[in-house]
Image: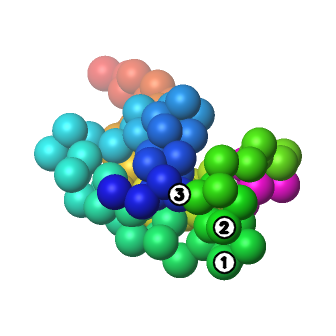
Amino acid sequence: MAVPVQIAILLALGGKLFDLVPLEKMEDAERAVCVEAAKLPGELNARLEGGEEMRDADRKTVMDMARAALEPFRAKPEAKPEAQAPQPAEKP
């Protein structure tokens, strides 16, 4: 696995981006991050491959990419039924 891809996975894990991904979707979600990480800009890839210290902008770029890649895999919160106002009791 290429260094930029490894870094993307580690940053996503450290940023808890995988926390909302259901276990049964985890492999596909990781694959999606890997695919998108391979598309990072050439300059950024070169810096990561070269072992340069990550800039804040680099970290933001990688995290934004990972967040977008994981969005389709996130568990959707179950819809809560709207609370209904109590109905007045009928008079006999």
Residue 22, x across and y down, in percent: 26, 41
Residue 50, placed above or below residue 44: above
Q: Are marks 2 and 1 in contact (CB under 8 Å)?
A: yes
Mark 3 vs mark 2, foreground winner is 2
| One can see residue 82 in this view | no
Q: Residue furthest right?
A: 56
Please state, as top left, top right, bottom left or bottom right, where the C terminus lies in the image: top left
Mark 3, secondary structure of its residue: helix
Specify start and end residues of the magenta stretch as a single range: 57-61
Q: Label 3, on which residue? A: 4
**Residue toward you, 51 or 11:** 51
Residues at marks 1 and 3, CA–CA distance in whole angstroms: 11 Å
| One can see residue 6 in this view | yes
Most common SS among magenta residues: helix
**At x 62% / y 67%, what residue is drawn?**
45
- Count of picture labels: 3
- Amino acid type at circle 2 is Ala
Residue 44, x across and y down, in percent: 70, 66
Q: Is residue 68 shown left or right of residue 80? A: right
Q: Label 2, on which residue? A: 46
Q: Label 1, on which residue? A: 42
Coloration of the structure image: rainbow
**At x 59% / y 58%, what residue is drawn?**
49
42 within the magenta span? no
Residues at marks 2 and 1, CA–CA distance in whole angstroms: 6 Å
- Amino acid type at circle 1 is Gly
Q: Are marks 3 and 2 in contact (CB under 8 Å)?
A: no
